[in-house]
Structure formats: structure tokens, C-alpha cells
Image: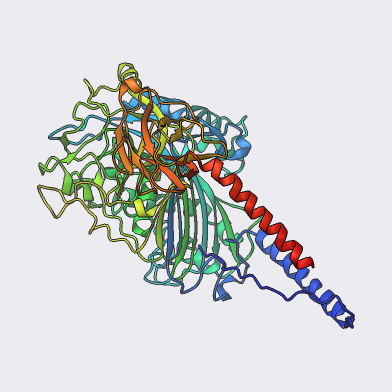
Amino acid sequence: MHEENSETTCYPALDKGNVEIDRSIKVRNKILAIGIIAIMVISAFAMLTPSRSYDSDLDEQPVPAGIEYGGDRETTYTISDMFQSYMKSRDYADLGRTNGTSGLNEWWDFRESGYGELIIRDTYPYIIASPPGPASYDVDPGFYTYAPYRLEVEASNVSDMGTATGKDTYFLPFLGNPNQDGGWVNISWYGTYLYSQDISDIRNRGVAHYANTYYDLFYRDMPNIANDGWWHELMGEMNFTRQAAKKFLGLPGTGDLRTEYAAVDGDVEADWMDEWLADGGGQYDTYTNYEYSDDIRVMRISMDYDNSTADLLQLRFYSISWGNEMLLTRYLEAGNITPSWQGYMEDMWLNMTIGPDMADVYLSGIFLYQMLAWKDPDAFKGAWSMEALHSDYIPNRAPLHLGYPSPYNDYNPATTNLMRPSYNVGTTQFGNNVSYWITPMILNLTDGERMIFRLPSTSVYAFEPYRGASDTLDAAKQTEMLSYGYWGEMVLGSCTPDMASNYDAANKTLTLNGPFDAWAARVPNQGDTSLIEQGSPMFVFTVSEVSDYDVEIVEPPETGGYYRIGVDYTLRVTAKDLSGSTVTDWNGTVIITTNDTLATLGGGSNSITHTFQASENGVWETTINFGTVGWWAVDAADENFTLDVTGGLATEVVYADIPEFAVLIIPILGAVAIFLVLRTKKRRE
């Protein structure tokens, strides 16, 4: 992202006297105006044209669109839309994508009944609980409760990926000679999960499902599968230049690409599917992050005749699998896009432009199983945590699943007794050390990389920190957890490392810019300091019932709007939530200060601290006595959330406490008025 600097030029005032006008200026201005309009029109067409489309002579273009050839890598991770989930459109014209309607999709019902998950809240803010993986825990973590959020990754000039000899795209098979240049490839994929109706309709020749009508899947090629909530649907479009079609699709590349592909499309499908299956069960085995090696049941790659040319091949891609979403996670890790911030995704977009030496990648998806209901380490308040994580949650298993060495092996409770603190709310081990249920990671940021967190501006949900009586995820556990639930504003909590200087409270945005050394900021495991206790960095966002402190002086000001020095006034502080209502059960601590250094608060100094008591019902009163004439402010800030939960009264004018002040000021003002009249009269004479 680049910001343009704007400069303001000041011009001299126009002389309104007689000016000889140069008529040629109008002609030049007209020519200039026409030129500017032409540029704007051309620019508009350029903006409307997809930035990732190519001309047929692309191989001859030294710097194709979308890549700053030879530029430095820039990557932005943006986390937003916390607690939000979107429904998959049931209108097949939408090609299986969301239409923006909030909700939990049907697959969660199947995961609840078949895999032991538990929907805690089925309306916004959406919250789900899940059991950990089937590891042999020394101390079972019980379960974890999480909320979805959207992750966007914009990575440009990624030199870890490429099509040239010796480079790898990771996502594409080598069906041709791998030791040749690979040209340019565009990929735009969308991934989500299937509804039972999808499975039925794809097999029904009488229904116009997009898998059949748009992606050209023959209805008889759809297997008879039962929906368990995990059938993943990956679809989209790709285009290949001539050289790319030769290297990755195995085409001869000597004639019309359309003709060449039409002759081998079935072979390309089968070979591509075989290579992905080999990857998903071999060097990129999904077993340790899915409990199963990649299992693809359908793959259809059809030609888009309308958008293909003799030199540019446009293809449509459609697949159904158990595990393709986690195979893509492996590829994203290999391409150095998301090596240390991983999770399951739905409503996922993956757009890539891959050239000889580098790539541009855009990833957007609803991330799951990663933002956990937690406790603020420094305040006994409910919070939500996010840490650098790997998607692996079980170790490698011999002899079948050794192709991808999992980083979880170092934390595997079957081979080590290492523990980490757990603040998984509602579990029987809350506040204790437990076995690792996920793999913590180190996420370093280099120059040009950054992470952005956009916190919700509306009230969200959290749970009071508590230890549960059972780890069984059932209706009773849902009722129990909701009894500890509360609403509040998400605020900056106790992150590791401290993130106060990175936080913009006004816009509720946290920005961590590279370079950032996550290893230096790590929390070492006490049993093995070469390993880490938690992911680094670790972000904690607390939910505070109070959003604002309303501060007021109870006594009305003197006539004229001022207060006197040396007088005790009643200062009232009220704890307010995001809607402006008083929080009657608030037990937080407020710090009151004034910039009048001689003032006293509560009879002491010019600052005072108070912890709200239950009997106060969210309203506390003390005294303030101003000590200096001037304009002063009285500010409030919560002890734990000094950047988010604040307040204060408007600056007041404070006059000296002189009883005869009004009597004295009248003759003084009269004398001044007489003096001004006499001086004016003298000037006129």
C-alpha cells in the first residue's frame, strides 16, 4: 500500500485591473482538457478490465500486469469480521458463493452430530465449541471454544513461487517437462462446503446445478456420497499462456491451444488428480492437520471456449474432496504465504498470478478453530485470543503418514511431557497446565510485511473466566456456558509482546509492522526453552462491559459557566456500556486525573484511583477542589484498558473564589469603557 503526498500551492491574489488576455491560452487549455479527458477514459477502461487477464502475446511482455517485476515483497495480513459467518447461497446462479447473509451453514449441524462439535450461539456473534484432536494427552485440554473471523492476505512479489526452471508454483502439477520455462498462470478459486441438496442435485440430470451447467460435470460422474459436513467444494477458473500450458498441462504447445486441450482434457483431469492425491498423502500429507490423507472424489477441468484463444487457454476447475482445503494450506505454507498463521477456511477466495520468478497472491476466507474464548492474563475478564499457529494438531503416524514431517511432533504428548497454560473457558482444566492441543509457531514479519486487526465496533459476546464441571459438549454445557456469557466492547487486552504502541483506539485497529522478531518476543516453554509455550506473537482482545466513563461535576457552575478555586465540588463517575446505559454490576478500577496540578481529588492529590463496588451500581462520587485559575480537564481511564475505556468532562473555566469579585469588576469595566470613549473622541478631534 502506498500513500500519495499531497501538496497545497498558494497563488498570488488576482489583480483586478486592466489585464491583456492572451487568447491562445484558451486554445492550449482546450487541447490540454481534451488530452486529460482522453487519459481518463483510457484509465477507466483499464480499471474496468480485470487486472489479471492477459493478451495472447503475453510471453513477449517483459512486465505483465499485477507484478512489479523485481520489486520487493509486500505482504499484508488483515483480520476483520470477527464472530461473523455467512450463508452459502442456495441460488445456483451464485455458483455456490455467499450472498452476504449472516448465518451458520448446514454443515455445522452434521459436524455437531458426527464429530462432537457444539454450537454455542447460532446467531451473531457466532460461537462454536470443539473437542481437541485424538492425541494421547497427558493432561487433556478438554475442549476449546472459538469464533470465526475473516483473514485476508495480500502478498505481492512473492519470490518463493514461480514458473521458471527450478521454481515451483506448488498448486499446479508438472504434466509436461518440468525443466522448461513456464510462462504465466492466473488462478481464481473459491472454496466452501457442500449442502446435502448440492450432493443430491448434482446427481440429478433434471436440476441445473452449477457443477453441471457451469463446470461441465456429468451428473453420472458424481459419486453417491453421504454428507458428514466435511465435503469440500473447490471451484474456479484458470488461464495458461502457451508456455504454461506446455509445462503444467503437458500440451505440445505447437498449435492452437484450444484444439490441443480438447484432445487430452480427460487425461489432464486424471493426471492432475493423481498428483494432488500423491501430494496429499505424501510430501504434503494432510493426515496431521485433517486426521486423513487428502481424498478427492471429483475433479473436472473443462475449457472455457468463449474466453480461450489459440495462445491463451482459459479453464474451469471443479472438485469435491475430503481434505483439499488442508492441501491448499500445505501449498500456501510451501509458498511462504501463510507458514505460521493457519486454520480451516470456508467462504475462501484464492487468487494468484504466477510468473517466472515471483507471484502475487490474494487469499480471503472465514477462518475457523483459531480465535479462542480465553482470559485476559492481566485482568479477570473474558477475552478472545489469537496466536501464531500451525494447522497440525496430531503427530505423524508410522508407517503410512511420514511424508510431511509435522512441527507438532515436538509437542506431541505421546513423546514429551511438555505443557502449556490453558485458559480455555469452561473446561475442567481452566487455569492449569495441559498438553498441547495445537502447534504454536513463530511468525516473523520482514520489512514490507504487516498484520492488521480490525476490532468490531458493535457489542460482542464473551464468557466470564470459569472452570467447568465437565468437558462433555452437550446441551447442558451450552446452557452452562451461556450462563457465564456477557456482552461488551472488544478492547485491546494483554498481548505478548505489549501492543499498546501499535493500537489506534479511535479506529479500533491494531497494526504490527515489520520488521518484527517474533523469536525475541517468544515465551519459552519452561521444560524446554528451545520450544515455545504459546504462539508468538499472541494477541488478546478483552471484552469489557464498560466502554466509557461519564464524568460530571454535580453542582451547576456559577453564572457565566465557571467554577471557583478552593471549593469542594462533587465529582460523579458513571460506568457506561456501548449503548450508553449504566453498567450496574461493574467492578473495574478507574483512574481520575486532572491537569490542574494544585487540585485535589478526594482530598488527596490531583489523581485518584477507585475500584467500583457492587453497592455503587456503577456510579461513584468523590470530590474535586480546583487550586489554580485557568482552563482544566478532568480525565478518566480504566486501569486495565487505558486506551479504550476512557472519559472526561469538558474543560471548565475556573475563577478565583473572591466574594467581592462581582462588586469589584463592575466599576473596573466602567472605568475601562469611559477611557475608551475619551480616547476615541480625542482621535476624532
Q: Quadrant of residue 472?
A: top left
Residue in view at x 35 percent, y 44 percent: 294
Image quadrant holding the C terminus, namely: bottom right
Q: Is residue 343 left or right of residue 208?
A: left
Residue 45 in the image, given as x and y percentages of width and height: 71, 62
Q: Considering depth in this image, is 309 or 511 the residue closer to the camera?
A: 511
Residue in view at x 24 percent, y 56 percent: 521
Q: Is residue 279 left or right of residue 577?
A: left
Q: Quadrant of residue 27?
A: bottom right
Residue in view at x 34 percent, y 60 percent: 445
Is residue 293 something that shows in the picture? no
Q: Considering depth in this image, is 671 or 328 the residue closer to the camera?
A: 671
Residue 75 in the image, given as x and y percentages of width and height: 43, 60
Residue 456 in the image, given as x and y percentages of width and height: 46, 39
Q: Is residue 494 left or right of residue 164?
A: left
Q: Considering depth in this image, is 448 or 13 the residue closer to the camera?
A: 13
When the figure is inspected, residue 377 is found, relative to residue 130, above or below; the finding is below
Q: Is residue 390 left or right of residue 32?
A: left
Is residue 433 something that shows in the picture? yes
When the figure is inspected, residue 547 is found, relative to residue 114, above or below; the finding is below
